[in-house]
Every structure is written in C-alpha cells, then in structure tokens.
C-alpha cells in the first residue's frame, strides 16, 4: 500500500460527474445548486487532477527506480498559459467533461474561461520553456523544470486614453488548484556575509562562506502531463519565505514591527516577475531571484532526487542542467561551492563534474540583453561565488594564454570580467566556459552567435557550438487552439500528426483539392467568428466580416518594428485621404496588434500610444468606407494567442534581419495556416525554406546587407527625403493628424525614426510596402491563397517542439526516453 498508486476515477461520463460533485462538496464545501462559477471551476480542476494523480505518482516511482539521467531545465520564466484545457487534452477527457457538465447544467467553456493563466514569463523565452516541458513529458523523457513561483506574473495591461497602464497580475487570488505546496521540503538559501580561510582536519587549506542572512525556499509542484501517454513530469517552482531563525532573531530583539517588515523583505524575493524583456536592469532583487531559485534547485536535486549515498563524482550520469539564457548561470559557481566547500572535492575534480552538468542556450543577439553583474553587487550578495568565478576565470585565461601565447589582447577580450563601464561578470562568457554545449535558437542565430557574439570562444572550441531551432507544442497551439482544423487533419490523414508533426506533409496532395480548400476556408472563417465574439465581449472591438486579418503579436520592441507596420497603415490611410487612391481600391483589411511594453521603456510605450491613436482615427474616418480597421486588444497573453493565431490570414514577422534570435509566434501562425510576411531573420529563414518562396512574402535587407549599411553609415532622413509615400506618412503624424492637431505628442517617435532609427525601419519601408501589395494581389485569388495556406500547414511540421527536444537529446543531453 505504501507504494501502490491511487486509482483513477472511471473514464466515463458517470465516473466524471460523480468525481466532480464529490470535489464540489468536499473541496469547495458547496452543493451544485449554491455553487459559484469559481467553485465549479475549482472543482473541475480538482476532478481532472484526480485523473492525473495516479500517473504522476507512478511516473515519479518509475523514474526514481530506473536511476536514469534526467533533464533539469533551469528557467527564470515559464509562460504556461491556462492549465485546464491542456490537462483535459492530455487525459482525453474533453468530451466526457463536456457531457458530464452538461448533465449538471453547466457549460465547460464558461468554466474554462474562469481560469486566470499563470503568466510567469515575459515572452518567447518563457513560452519556449513551457513548450519544451510539454514535449519532454509527451516523449516520455524524465525532466524536472525548476523556476520561480512569482506571486505576481507579467503585469495586466490596460489602456487609458491610449496609453499603457500596468496593473498587478493577481493570478493566485481566486485559488490555485494546479499547485501542490510542500513546505516540509523547504530549502534554506544563504546570502551576504563574508568568506574565511581555515585548515581542515586533514591539514588542507579550505574556504568557508559565513553568510549574513537567509531565506527559505518552499517548493510548489505542478503536473506536466504528457499527451495521452500516462507520463506526468514535474515542474517545481520556488516561493521565498522568511526562515524561523530570521524571525526569531528580530522578534526576540523586541521590535515586532521591524520583524514583520523583515519577513516581508524575505518574501519579496519571489514577489514579482521582472517585466523587462531583453534589457537587464542589474537590480539587486533580480540577482537575488536568480540565485534563490538556482540554489533551491541544486540543493533539491542533490538531496532529494538522488538516492542516499550517491557519489557526486558521477553527477552527470543523472542530470544535465539546461541553462535557459544566462538568468540561471549563477548555478555554475553554486555547484562548485557545494562540491568544493561542502563535499571536500579538489578544485579540478569539482570543475570536471561541473563542466559536464551544464549546457547553455542563448536567446538573443542584442548586446544590451547580455547580462553583466557588477562585481560590487556580486561580492556583497554572494562573496564566495565571486571568488569562485574569479578562480574559474584565472584558470580559463591561463588556458587561453597557453593556446595563444603572447596574445594578451585576446585574453583580455575573453575574460569573464569586464572592466567597463564598471567591473562586472559577463554571464554569457561564464556559461560558455562552463557548458558542455552552447546553442542558439535558430540556424541564422546560431551562426551569428558563433561569428559575432562569441567568436573567440567558437574559435577556441568549435565543437562546443551547436544549433537547435526552436519549436512549439502542437498540442496547445494546434490541437487545442484550432479544434476544427485538427479534426479536418485527423479525418484526412489520421491523428498520428499530434505527436509526429512531420506527418502533416501528407496533407500536401490536398492543397489543390477544391473540396478540402472549401473546408479549410470555412474553418478559418469559423475561427474568425470565434475571435470576433471574444474581442467583442473582452474589449468591445467589432471585427468586420470578410477582411484579410493581418496580425502582429509579440512584445513591443524597436527591433521588432511595430512602427514599420504602423507606417504601412498610416500610408494606406494617407493615400485615401489625399485622394491618391480610392477607398474602394483597398483590400478590406483588419490589422490586429497585441503587445506589452516594458514599463520603463519609453519609446515602446509611446509607440503603443501612437498605435491606439491611429486606430481611433482610422476606425472612425468614413473616408475609408470601413475597408481598413486597426484593433489593439489590451493584455495580449497566451490565452488570447490561442484564439488570435488560428484566425489570422497574415503573420507579421518583420524584425530587422539579424535581431530576432528565432521567434516562435512565426511558427504558430504558419502551423495554423497564416501566410508570413517577413524578413530573412531568425526562424523565418527556415520557415521560408520549408514552405517555399511562393508561399512566403519576403522583404527587406538580409543580415549582411544590414551590416553593410551599418558600416557605411545609416542615415534615415535620406529615405524620408527620397520616398514621397514614406514622407507623407511621417508628415501626417508630425502634423498632428492622430493627436488632434498636437504636433508634439508623437514628436519623440517621429524624431527617433528620422534621426536615429537604430533598427532601420525606414530603409525597409519601400520593400515592405511592395511585399504588402503582393499580399493583396494573392489574397484576391482565394484559391491560390488557400492553397498556399494549406501548404504552410503541411510543410511546417519541423517546428514541433518535439523535434527541438529530439535535437537537444541527440546533440546536447544524451538522455534516453523511458521504455
Ligand atoms: C532582462 C534581461 C533579459 C534578457 C533577455 C530578459 C529576457 C531576455 C530574453 C532572452 C528575451 C527573449 O525572450 N528572447 C526570445 O527568446 C525566444 C525563444 O528562444 C526567441 O524565439 C526570440 O527570438 C527571442 O527574442
């Protein structure tokens, strides 16, 4: 009995209803007739959890007994999206739940919309982590995801007079049915203080860290169910709490109020997700968060996931820690500290073990996104770790000097310690030196990573560098998000594609089949109607029928160039207003934006303001005869993405070439049959190769052309001067057309484009507008458009995150699926 798993409720409508009512009564303490929607949602979540429980317990037992190597995915962000739908899918309970709830007089969709998604990430990097753990569970690969249980996830975006206003994301406030707290398994994490040398009993010179304060890490477990395969992996998120000792010390000092404040101080560590995406602020609390979750995770794995007496010399037989960008890189000196200071390893021995336990993924190319922690801060917060980093660096530089005798300039360049603008640790260099492998997230990105960001390192260790192109989970982003398309695909080629996405290729012959095309188009239309009713209820936005739905959803950042999309809209409007074209010449089009700006990113926030003002004007000007609309629903998140992406005709992927590491939204759109208008950047390159030039709207400079123009000296004003259409659009903004005549309101945005334009939007404008004309031409031929759309679906199976995981396993992790 001690090891026997609980049994699952019966997989039938009857069994489901019984379990649901039981949960409603015993968990929520209400009867059906008196229950609220939230009660019903929570009881439903518990019910579905009960179906997963036996599998979870069994997975844990099996994995522990098998003593196999697991993946420890270390990520400061997991952008999970709602859990209920995914859990229903993984257990094949969708139909049963629908019918069972109907018998109770309830509507499954209503209960599903009660869930507040855990938005514990900013964007691409966090959503990627969520896709990866889904794939690993589905592929039966042992994995523990480690991260932070932020009490507040990414802020809720609202608009006031068109400007972004941030509200706290209180995702836990109506209950959190998907988590399992384990306070008894809490872990202590130390901070501050100093180090001291001492001689141990064997006469060895040793160092110990004498920390000044500590906090507790409380683990919260989440189920990560595989798709219909009985495996349920674990995501373990850490929450910070004050320790008893911490409390007692101050409470005994008699200052009660101060003691309560101190408690708050400890709990602050996991209070809120930093909303900066790609510009690290170097904030002390952020470093505390990073060390906090990494220290908890390493301690947890070593103490709890390994059997007693495990020889840590063999640690890499049991775990590979994947570093999701540099945010968890402090794990490297932490493992060294554990092995050397606590376990008594010799330095070299410890370094051999450490080097074999980590691999590093870089997710960016923007220089300002590369984390550098000041040595002043590191030394104050983690004095022992700083010493260890210095020693790792010394030994590494000795190796560099031995390999390149006399090349002191190179040694300086490669040092993990930057000297300017202040002394700091380059976390990407540390990760590269410590990792068994370093990878970028798309072919082009990995190449630029080798050639531009880490050239010295790739010269020294060419075999260390590899590429793994990102992917997305077809379960959430096709099967769940696009149920009718999924049914059509399954009716046509069987349902194997859900776990073997390359099989979508079998759809190719149907691309020319008029009957299949009709069904395909009808599904797109249905998805648009579904989106329309959601946006109407959510934001009061009404989408017109029969429009080309043109979608740009992603974080607001200059390099992604929402401003280029906006200039295109303004230009269409301007041409009608000035009589250059008739409104009837326009292809009826609705542009949808979704984007959050980092709260401190002024230019991004001004751009949001301008989009909203342009929308207001364009949507209400009768001169356009309703043929051009702009919608900007607030608070774009995973939940909205699931409704928006399946409805889209056109996917905007228009970053300046060489700037977007991969993109993953681009993959989701293509898999749902949107055609891409995009630059030769990130994974767009691979999408275009796979779908073919005829089914992709390419525009703009490629990366070498960007580099050349940059080297030559880029002067945006020359484009303004030489292109009347661009000039007219910018003039329209400057003249106050979108600000009731106020010529200053958007001065900063226009001035930036004219005089700086770091991401060369003006240089690509002409080519972008030409590509949009091609879009319209093609859209006019619905059969041709639908054919391309079907071929996009059929040819992008490569972008399943299952394939990404296979690549990681083969090239980096060398782990095995179970059975
Ligand atoms: C505040 C510091 C910071 C720095 C970088 C925060 C977050 C980052 C991330 C690396 C930003 C990010 O999410 N990068 C995106 O990662 C995706 C998954 O690999 C890629 O598809 C996107 O192209 C990349 O921008």
Image (tube, rainbow, N blue to C red):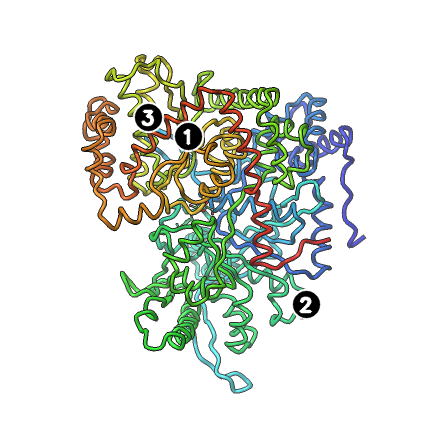
Give residue 652's quadrant in the image: top left
Total number of numbered labels? 3
Q: Can I make out residue 289 in this image?
A: no
Determine the residue positioned at 55% across, 59% down. Answer: 321
- Mark 1–mark 2 CB contact (< 8 Å): no
Q: Specify the label residue 569 is tagged with.
A: 3
Which comes before the other along the chain, label 1 or label 2? 2
Structural distance between the alpha carbons of marks 2 and 3:
64 Å
Q: Can I make out residue 308 in this image?
A: yes
Label 3: how many residues lie within 10 Å, few (<14), some (14-19) or many (20+)? many
Q: Position of residue 425 (x, y in %)?
A: 37, 63
Residue topped by disc 2 = 308
Q: Residue furthest right?
A: 1
Q: Secondary structure at mark 2?
A: loop
Q: Position of residue 243 (x, y in %)?
A: 52, 58
Q: Position of residue 273 (x, y in %)?
A: 44, 46
Q: Secondary structure at mark 1?
A: loop
Give residue 768's quadrant in the image: top left
Q: Specify the label residue 634 is tagged with.
A: 1
Q: Specify the label residue 690 is tagged with.
A: none
Left or right of 558 in this view: 469: right
User: Looking at the image, which is closer to me, 76 or 412?
Assistant: 412
């Amino acid at each position: 009995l001690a090891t026997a798993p609980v049994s699952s409720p019966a997989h039938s409508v009857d069994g489901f209803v019984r379990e649901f009512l039981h949960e409603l009564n015993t968990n929520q303490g209400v009867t059906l007739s008196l229950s609220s929607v939230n009660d019903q949602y929570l009881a439903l979540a518990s019910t579905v959890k009960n179906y997963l429980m036996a599998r979870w317990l069994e997975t844990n037992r099996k994995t522990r007994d098998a003593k196999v190597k697991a993946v420890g995915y270390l990520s400061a962000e997991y952008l999970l999206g709602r859990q209920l739908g995914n859990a229903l899918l993984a257990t094949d309970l969708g139909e049963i739940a629908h019918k069972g709830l109907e018998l109770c007089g309830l509507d499954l969709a209503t209960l599903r919309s009660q869930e507040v998604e855990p938005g514990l990430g900013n964007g691409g990097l966090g959503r990627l982590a969520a896709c990866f753990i889904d794939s690993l569970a589905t592929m039966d690969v042992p994995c523990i995801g480690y991260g932070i249980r932020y009490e507040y996830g990414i802020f809720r975006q609202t608009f006031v007079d068109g400007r972004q206003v941030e509200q706290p994301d209180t995702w836990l406030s109506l209950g959190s049915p998907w988590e399992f707290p384990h306070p008894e398994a809490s872990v202590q994490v130390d901070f501050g203080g100093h180090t001291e040398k001492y001689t141990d009993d064997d006469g060895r010179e040793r160092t110990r860290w004498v920390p000044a304060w500590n906090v507790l890490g409380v683990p919260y477990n989440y189920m990560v169910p595989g798709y219909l395969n009985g495996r349920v992996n674990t995501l373990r998120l850490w929450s910070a709490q004050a320790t008893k000792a911490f409390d007692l010390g101050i409470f005994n000092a008699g200052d009660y109020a101060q003691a309560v404040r101190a408690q708050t101080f400890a709990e602050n560590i996991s209070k809120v997700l930093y909303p900066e995406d790609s510009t690290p602020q170097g904030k002390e609390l952020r470093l505390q968060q990073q060390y906090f979750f990494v220290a908890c995770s390493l301690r947890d794995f070593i103490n709890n996931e390994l059997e007693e007496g495990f020889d840590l010399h063999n640690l890499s037989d049991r775990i590979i820690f994947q570093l999701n960008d540099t945010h968890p890189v402090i794990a490297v000196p932490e493992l060294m500290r554990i092995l050397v200071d606590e376990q008594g390893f010799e330095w070299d021995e410890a370094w051999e073990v450490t080097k074999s336990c980590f691999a590093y993924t870089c997710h960016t190319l923007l220089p300002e996104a590369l984390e550098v922690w000041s040595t002043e801060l590191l030394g104050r917060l983690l004095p022992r770790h700083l010493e260890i980093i210095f020693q790792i660096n010394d030994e590494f530089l000795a190796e560099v000097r031995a390999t390149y005798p006399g090349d002191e300039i190179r040694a300086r360049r490669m040092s993990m310690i930057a000297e300017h603008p202040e002394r700091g640790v380059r976390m990407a260099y540390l990760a590269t030196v410590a990792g068994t492998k370093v990878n970028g997230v798309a072919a082009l990105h990995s190449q630029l990573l080798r050639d531009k960001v880490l050239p010295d390192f790739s010269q020294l260790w060419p075999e260390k560098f590899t590429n793994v192109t990102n992917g997305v989970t077809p379960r959430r982003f096709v099967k769940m998000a696009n149920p009718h398309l999924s049914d059509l695909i399954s009716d046509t080629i069987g349902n194997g594609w859900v776990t073997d996405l390359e099989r979508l290729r079998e759809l190719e012959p149907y691309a020319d089949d008029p009957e299949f095309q009709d069904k395909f188009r009808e599904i797109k239309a249905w998805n648009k109607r579904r989106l329309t009713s959601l946006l109407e209820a959510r934001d009061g936005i009404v989408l017109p029928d029969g429009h080309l739905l043109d979608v740009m959803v992603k974080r607001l950042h200059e390099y992604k160039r929402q401003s280029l999309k906006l200039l295109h809209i303004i230009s269409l409007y301007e041409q009608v207003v000035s009589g250059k074209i008739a409104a009837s010449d326009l292809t009826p089009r609705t542009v949808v934006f979704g984007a959050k700006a980092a709260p401190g990113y002024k230019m991004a926030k001004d751009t949001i303001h301008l989009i909203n003002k342009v929308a207001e004007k364009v949507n209400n000007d009768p001169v356009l005869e309703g043929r051009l609309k702009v919608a900007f629903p607030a608070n774009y998140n995973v939940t909205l993405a699931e409704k928006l992406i399946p409805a889209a005709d056109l996917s905007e992927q228009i970053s300046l070439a060489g700037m977007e590491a991969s993109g993953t939204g681009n993959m989701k759109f293509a898999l749902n049959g949107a055609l891409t208008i995009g630059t030769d950047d990130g994974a767009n390159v691979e999408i275009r190769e796979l779908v073919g030039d005829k089914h992709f709207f390419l525009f703009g400079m490629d990366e070498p052309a960007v580099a050349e123009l940059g080297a030559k000296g880029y002067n945006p004003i020359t484009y303004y001067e030489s292109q009347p259409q661009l000039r007219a659009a910018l003039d329209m903004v400057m003249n106050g057309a979108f600000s009731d005549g106020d010529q200053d309101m958007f001065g900063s945005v226009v001035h930036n484009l004219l005089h700086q334009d770091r991401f060369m939007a003006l240089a690509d404008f002409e080519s972008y507008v030409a590509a949009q004309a091609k879009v319209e031409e093609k859209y006019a031929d619905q059969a041709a458009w639908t054919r391309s759309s079907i071929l996009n679906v059929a040819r992008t199976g490569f972008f399943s995150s299952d394939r990404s995981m296979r690549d990681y396993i083969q090239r980096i992790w060398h782990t095995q699926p179970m059975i």
